[in-house]
Image: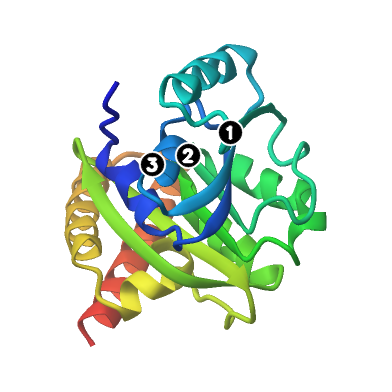
């Protein structure tokens, strides 16, 4: 069975350093750890999931690829089943930002032994960035991609000191802005258009709810434009 990863998962795989020992949280079918081991990037991997059904499928795929000696499928709620020293790289992708923060918080005992946290939040990446900054992590690398019309980010968080983030950096990513990620430019332009159209549609609407929504959208639009100005600087 040949495995074809999505573009997002291919980017996740590209963030893993050769020779890594990887724990893939929420592994689902186990495709990421299988790919990492087959390509010789990971020397060992743990495919971890809280659900027995997906974990059973992952086990089947691991055995089918002849990798049951190099990949262990393990039932685990986040990183609760991971012991310090078992992995130097943890992957958490395809889940919301709040869940990723929960995984990081619950995995505090692993912070000094896991060298790379490769994170790809499906939502609220700004909350993840702020949590990292406030808890002694540095975003060493971040990339954005667009797949099937949806924008995703992948970030590599390591222990280190990160300067406090302003609103634009928190929302759009300090690395993406500083390094002028080309996909970020497309995202900023698209978002500016969407926000402007929604704001225009709210003009003239009375009531506290409409006023609060205009305020919220106006702040986001101003943040978008600050990010674009910093991107172009």
The residue depicted at 62 percent of the width and 40 percent of the height is 99
Q: Distance from label 3 to label 1 (Cα)? A: 12 Å
Label disc, if present, on residue 228 of the rendered structure: none
The span from disc 3 to disc 2 (Cα, nearest Å) is 8 Å
Which residue corresponds to the image point at 68% horizontal and 45% vertical from the top-left? Answer: 103
Q: Which mark is residue 69?
A: 1
Q: Earlier in the sequence, mark 3 or mark 2?
A: 2
Q: Position of residue 108 (x, y in %)?
A: 79, 56
According to the picture, the residue beneath numbered tag 2 turns out to be 33
Percent x, y of residue 11: 32, 52
Which residue is at 64% across, 81% downward? 161
Does residue 168 appear anywhere in the picture?
no
Element under disc 3: helix
Tag 1 or tag 3, which sits nearer the N-term?
3
- Residue indicated by mark 3: 38
Where's residue 146, x and y in %?
Answer: 22, 47
Relative to 143, is 19 on the left or the right? Answer: right
Quarter of the image with the C terminus is bottom left
């Amino acid at each position: 069975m040949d495995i074809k990863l999505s573009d997002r998962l291919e980017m996740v795989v590209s963030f893993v350093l050769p020779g890594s020992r990887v724990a893939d949280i929420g592994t689902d079918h186990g495709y990421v750890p299988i790919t990492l081991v087959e390509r010789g990037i990971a020397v060992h991997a743990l495919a971890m999931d809280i659900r027995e059904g997906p974990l059973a499928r992952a086990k089947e795929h691991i055995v089918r690829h002849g990798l049951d000696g190099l990949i262990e499928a393990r039932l685990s709620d986040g990183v609760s089943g991971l012991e310090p020293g078992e992995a130097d790289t943890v992957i958490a992708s395809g889940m919301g930002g709040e869940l990723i923060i929960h995984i990081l918080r619950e995995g505090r005992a692993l912070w000094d032994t896991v060298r790379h946290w490769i994170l790809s939040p499906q939502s609220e990446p700004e909350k993840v960035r702020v949590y990292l900054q406030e808890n002694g992590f540095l975003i060493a690398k971040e990339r954005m991609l667009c797949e099937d019309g949806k924008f995703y980010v992948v970030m590599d968080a390591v222990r280190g000191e990160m300067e406090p983030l302003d609103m634009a950096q928190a929302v759009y990513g300090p690395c993406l802005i500083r390094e002028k990620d080309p996909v970020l430019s497309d995202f900023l332009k698209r978002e500016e258009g969407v926000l402007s159209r929604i704001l225009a549609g709210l003009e003239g609407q009375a009531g506290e709810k409409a006023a609060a929504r205009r305020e919220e959208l106006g702040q986001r639009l101003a943040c978008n434009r600050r990010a674009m100005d910093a991107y172009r600087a």
